[in-house]
Every structure is written in C-alpha cells, then in structure tokens.
Image (cartoon, coloured by chain):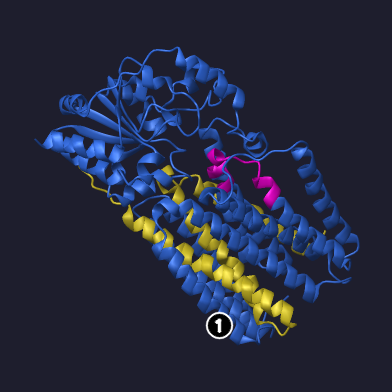
Amino acid sequence: MTLSLTETFVQLLYLAASILFVLGLKDLGDAQTARRGVLLAEVGMVAAVVGTLLYGVEVSGVIVRWEWLILATLIGSAVGTGMGLWIPMTKMPERIALSHAFGGLAVALVGVVEYLEHGGPHMTTLSVTATGLEVALGALTFTGSLMAFGKLQGFITGKPVTYPGQNASNMLMIVGTLGLVGLLVYSPGASWAFFAVAALGVLLGVLLVLPIGGADMPVVICLLNSYAGLAASATGFALGNNVLIICGALDGFSGFLLGMMMSKAMNRSFANVLFGAFGAEPEAKAVTAGAASSGPAPNVGSVEEAAEVLRAARTVIVVPGYGMAVSQAQHAVRDLASALQANGCDVRYAIHPVAGRMPGHMNVLLAEANVPYDHLFDLDVINDDFSATDVALVVGANDVVNPAARNNQSSPIYGMPILSADMAKTCLVLKRSLNPGFAGIENELFVRPNTMMVLGDAKKTISQFTAALKE
Amino acid sequence: MSLTLIFGLYVFFLAAFTGYQVISKVPHLLHTPLMAFTNAISGISLVGSLLAAGGHYGTVSTVLGAVAVLAATINVVGGFLITDRMLRMFKKKGGAR
C-alpha cells in the first residue's frame, strides 16, 4: 500500500505528535523540566490538528463546512482560557472532573456521528465494536464526571447513596451493555441497539458514582480519567487513527496508575472503593463515640504555651490538611515557617498522599503559597524522621495522623498508612473545637500525653505564633 | 481478526507500556499537574471531532460534531493553560533543607 505524498505527510505529523506527547509526559517527571514538557505537548497538539485538517481537506475531502469548525473552536478556546486562568487552586478537583465530562462528551458525540453517517449493515466488526464501546465509555465518563463534579461542589450529597440490589443491578446493566455491543457485531444495522448502548452508558455513569463517598473522590477522579482515555482509544480503533489510540492509552494508563496509588495510600482495593460505599460506617462511629466519652481528656494548651514550645524547637514538621488550604491558612503557615527558620529551626512539610481532594493536590496548594517544593516530603521519605523531631504541627489534618489506623482493628481506617505525628516529642494539633472531625472518626492522637491541642481558627492561631516568635 | 485490529492492538499496548513506564516516574508532587496534562492530551479527540463537525453530513451530525469540537477545545486550551499555571507556582528554594 503506497500513500500519496499528502497522506504520508499527515501520517508523519501524527507520528511527530505521538512522540511529542510521550516526551512531554517524560519531562513531567521532574519539576525542573515539566514546563518544557507542556510546551512539547502543545506543539504535538498543533501538529495533530494541522494533520487532521490537511487530511480532511486534501485526502478524504470530508471537511467542507468551516463555519462550524471555526465557531466551535473559538468558543471552546474562550471557555478553556477562562477555566485555565481563573479557577482557584482549591477548586482544581472540580475543574478536572468537569473537563473529564467534556472529554467523555466529545468522544461519545463523535461515536454517534460515526454511527449515523457510516453505520448500518455494512459496518465492519472492528468499527462497530469500537464505536459501540466508544459511545458507552464516553457517555459513562460524561455523566459519571458530572456526578463527581456535583459531589465535590456539594450539589449532590457527598455521602454514599445506596439501595438494595445496587451492585447486582449495576452489574446487570454492564453485562447488558456489552451484550448489546455483541448484538451490533452480528447486526450492525440495529440502530435501536446502538442508541440503547448510549443510553445505558449515560445511566451507568450516574449509578456507578452515586454510591461513592466524598472521601473516595480522589480515586473516582483518577478512574474517570482512565475511562476518558479508554474511550478516546476506542475512537482511534473506530477511525483507524493511531494518534488517538496512543493518547487514549497514555491517558487511560495514567488514570489507572494514579487510582491504584491513591487506593494503596488509603489501604483500600479498587473494588472496595467502587462497591464499598465508604463513609457511611454507622457501626464503627457508634463504637468509637462511646469509647471516647469515657476516655482521657485532651491536653488543651494556650497560644502562649504553644509558642514557647515552638520557640524552643530545633526541628519542626508541618502536617497540612485540606482544612488548612480551604481557610487559606497556608500563607500564614509559610510566614510561621520563615519566622521559625529565622530562629534557626529546621522546617519541613510532610505530605500524605491523600491530603487534599485529588492526587498531589496539597503540593499545588502549598506551591500557591510560595512554599518551595524541596521542603515538601512524601510520607515514605519523612515518616521515620518524626521520632527525632521536636514538634509536629498538625494543621487541619485528621485521618492522615490518626494512630487508630495503626492499632485499632475496628476502625474503618485501620491499615491505612499514616503520618507518625504522634512520634514527635510534642505534637501540636490546631483544631477549631473538640468535636469529632469531618469523617466522624475519633482521633486518639488528641488525647496522647505528648499532644497539645490549640483550639480556634488555625489561621489566627498561626499568625499569633508568628507574632510571638518575632517578639 | 482483521490486520487493522492487530496493528491497532500493537499500537495500544506499546503505548500503554510506554505510558506506564513514563507515568510511574512522575513524583507525587506533580500528580495534579499530571492529571491536568493528560486531560489536555485527551483533547486529542479533537481529531475525530473536527472530521465529524466539518463533514458534509446532515444537520444533526454537524451540530453534534460542533459540540464535540467545542468540548475538546475547552479541554485542550484549558488543560494546557492550567497545567502551566500550576507548574509556574512550583519553586525550588534550594539551600535550606
């Protein structure tokens, strides 16, 4: 098979785009080169688009209606620019979920157009299977991501919604979808089956995300990333386009890999996240609540006492949680760190993998407050250092420092790797009140003898620490 | 099995393995930018969308295609912009441990 000169050029552009995407991802492996990686991928995207337009005009003669293309591209660019430049970093998970929805929508619609225009009895087995899977996955990603967005944004309850027979009916729908795709292979002209696949995809997206609780959102976002990639790959199979297959595979695998990492960080299996409906846990809550009321009282210290402890400290590890980021206390923490450093103290930050609302979210939030990234340390790197540390300063974090994960088998978070803040000589916990935290799980760290609680707004408390240190 | 399918599967699995190798080396620090980045690359569905929207098909197909172009463009432009915006914030101070 010999290609025309133009077609050869188009294929070379696609090849260049694929190589640039892989190189871009490789550059993203190091903060020093990451921005160059983005640039490479941008060039790759331009190459892919130019190649497609060239193909559509010169080779296949498909592209003839420019007005629609130009209009859609202009509006899309305007909206994309807005979303890229002005969304606050705390809202990043919502933004990512929303763009997964866009990705799923685009793929599903391309599949529908494919079927409408080239479908029917003459479709090959490969293209009808690929198109069917593409539409099912695309539709599922679209509604599933909207659900995730709704949960993150608080439009839909963050609590898991369950009903009897949930897993069985979901499983039935998945099998039904695959069955209908199989039917299309034998009877590609059965358009009812095709649109039933699309409808089931839409429904599955809603029903699969409904039972997943807010605590598991990071995994869900990763998983939706993965689905969006696989859907794009299926499009590649349907259109016979390698750059789509490659990008889809890259996207699909990155989502899958991150999802696995997040699950591991919470000591849960993928299946557990998907079908476990974590977050309800009524029994466990009742047990720990009862135990806590008869337990020892926490040691509550004043701001002055805590500031004295910090003044004497030679090493401090800050354990930030999402609560800190939401109240924008990270700027106050950064100021405190500067004051401590001026005092000759060594300050580091311990970042739990699931701190924040998506993988690596806390790193971004701290970067926004100008905390240098070489002061941030992952759990496995810093955890052994706590025992040789004067002060662990816990700001707005709860579950990720709860020793119950280590020694209370009845706790819902038992087995989850935690930051060993309790091992530090003194553990300063900043908390609004003594009420149990968001997850509803009591934290025995608060009543440890080496723990000092400082109650009140974290941002204000930290500013007072800084002022006291500067005196 | 058609040759196209076999060839496609080669491409898919080689890309998947390459992706696995490359992505597993991305540090925790950069996982959020990584997600925004793969989001932008997944806007490659623009390739299919452009062909669907620009075609001399019926109105329904053209409108659906145009919406697909719109959605994919949002991902490409927004994804790249926000990735770069995040990466710009990551600063290394060095020296102080």
* Secondary structure found at label 1: helix
Q: Is residue A184 left or right of residue A239?
A: right
* B49 vs B63, nearest the viewer: B63
Q: Is residue B18 visible?
A: no
Q: Position of residue A146 (x, y in %)?
A: 60, 56
Q: Main secondary structure of the magenta part?
A: helix
Chain B drawn in what color? yellow
Q: Is residue A186 left or right of residue A72?
A: right
Q: A24 or B92: nearer the eye? A: B92
Q: Colour of chain A?
A: blue
Residue drawn at (35%, 25%) of the image: A421
Q: Please provide the residue range marked out in magenta.
A: A206-222
Is residue A208 located in the magenta-colored stretch of the structure?
yes
- Asked if the magenta segment contains residue A292, the reply would be no
Left or right of B28 on screen, residue A120 = right
The one nearer the camera, A233 or A195, is: A195
Q: Quadrant of the C terminus of chain A?
A: top left
Query: To which residue does mark 1 refer?
Result: A70
- Marked residue chain, label 1: A
Q: Quadrant of residue A233?
A: bottom right
Give the total number of marks visible in the rendering: 1
Q: Residue at x 48, y 62 (%)?
A: B79
Whether residue A194 appears in this view of the structure is yes
Q: Is residue B15 above or below residue B77?
A: above
Q: Residue furthest left?
A: A471
Location of residue A186 in the rendering, given as x and y in whole percent from the top left corner:
91, 61
The quarter holding residue A189 reads bottom right
Inspect the image, locate mark 1, and give the three-letter code of the amino acid beneath it. Ile
Identify the residue at image location x=39%, y=56%: A88
* Residue A37 locus on image (x, y percent): 42, 60
Tell me where residue A275 sits by quadrant: top right
Quadrant in which the N terminus of chain A appears = bottom right
